[in-house]
Amino acid sequence: MSEVIVITSGKGGVGKTTTSANVGTGLAILGKKTALIDTDIGLRNLDVVMGLENRIVYNLVDVVEGNCRMKQALIRDKRYPNLYLLPSAQTRDKTAVSPEQMTKLVDDLRDEFDYILLDCPAGIERGFQNAIAGADRALVVTTPEVSAIRDADRIIGLLEASEMGEIDLIINRVRMDMVKRGDMMSVEDVTDILAVNLAGVIPDDESIVISTNQGEPLVGMGSMAGQAYLNICRRIMGEEIPFLNLDTQPRFLMRLSSLLRRA
Amino acid sequence: MVWNVFMRLSGNHSGSLAKKRLKMVLVTDKVDCSPDLIDRMRDDMLHAISKYMVIDREGIELRIVHRPGTALYAAFPILDIPTKGIC
């Protein structure tokens, strides 16, 4: 049985695309056949985060308009053979696709894949409506900042109004050192306010920047963020996984180890 | 630096300030309701109050105010209070 998950946030720049790439890759690592769909028409990014930007021939709009078959547009991942990307179109805009067309496109993939992940554009307009149309459940990404949480609250309201099956929250870029000294909202503060189920917490980790530079998602690798993403994938698959203690590695040790890596 | 130390000693961390501001802004966002909702609320309230008082329908005022705090402000001018059979 396949499941369609939309990754959304309202606000831009909180880590939707990074989360899509890592959760998609993580599900593939765990043996699930997974399709990642970049629905951000006009501003495609998932291809570069996945390191697949040089392999694009056809895109989502080509499939919708019948210029190619779905199989021709799907790009197989360079590391995991059961992971595919359907890239977005860069030279078109959001109105090139309707919510009905997106629902049909996603439904056509259901027989083939265990998980279909939709990377949603920022905002609440057409692109958002397109992305949520065909989804069974949603992952809402936020950071512990007033502006991001305000937008997440609005998005959760819109998802509830559209009768989204399940809504889970991912809190990204948490800095435990700042939370401890009271200068950042804690995970509890955020879940208190948003009142949805927590799927996971990703620490603010410089290895994310490095992995994006390299075009290779870090899920399942040695870093804390990589571990946190893999745990999210297991929770999506229905496993009960305790939350990581993000406070195990003091900041100065992290700095020291990164210095040693560089040397 | 000195300011940071002062803020910390006085228990005013920026994290809790953020939470307070966020709660406030969410309440304000949610009560920024549509004129249609205000109309329906006015009709429902008028219906309830009319059981006990005669109201000047033209003079009704209903709006949401944000300072101090967010509140629903309602004024229903009374024309008459029939006493028999009610009080």
Image (spheres, coloured by chain):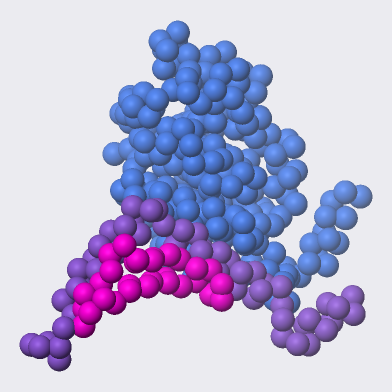
- Vertical order, B71 against A89 (above or below): below
Quadrant in the picture for the N terminus of chain A:
top left
Lateral position of residue A248 relative to residue A158, left or right:
right
Task: Determine the image quadrant of residue A116.
Answer: top left
Q: Is residue A90 magenta?
A: no
Part of the protein shown in magenta = B53-81
Indicate the position of residue A243 as horizontal and vertical percent values: 52, 66
Q: Is residue B68 magenta?
A: yes
Chain drawn in purple: B
Lateral position of residue A42 relative to residue B74, left or right:
right
Is residue A163 visible in the rendered image? The answer is: yes
Residue at 47%, 20% (x, y): give it.
A96
- Vertical order, A123 against A144 (above or below): above
Residue at 83%, 61% (x, y): give it.
A255
Lateral position of residue A99 relative to residue A42, left or right:
left
Indicate the position of residue A177 as horizontal and vertical percent values: 73, 70
- Vertical order, A258 against A34 (above or below): below
Lateral position of residue B45 relative to residue A188, left or right:
left
Which colour is chain A painted?
blue
Residue at the limit of the structure toward the left, as seen here: B85
Q: Nearer the viewer, residue A245 or B17?
A: B17
Indicate the position of residue A91 as horizontal and vertical percent values: 60, 17
Q: Nearer the viewer, residue A242 or A69?
A: A69
Residue at the limit of the structure toward the front, as seen here: B79
Q: Nearer the viewer, residue A83 or B33?
A: B33
Residue at 60%, 28% (x, y): give it.
A44
Residue at 40%, 39% (x, y): give it.
A132
Indicate the position of residue A26 as horizontal and vertical percent values: 52, 44
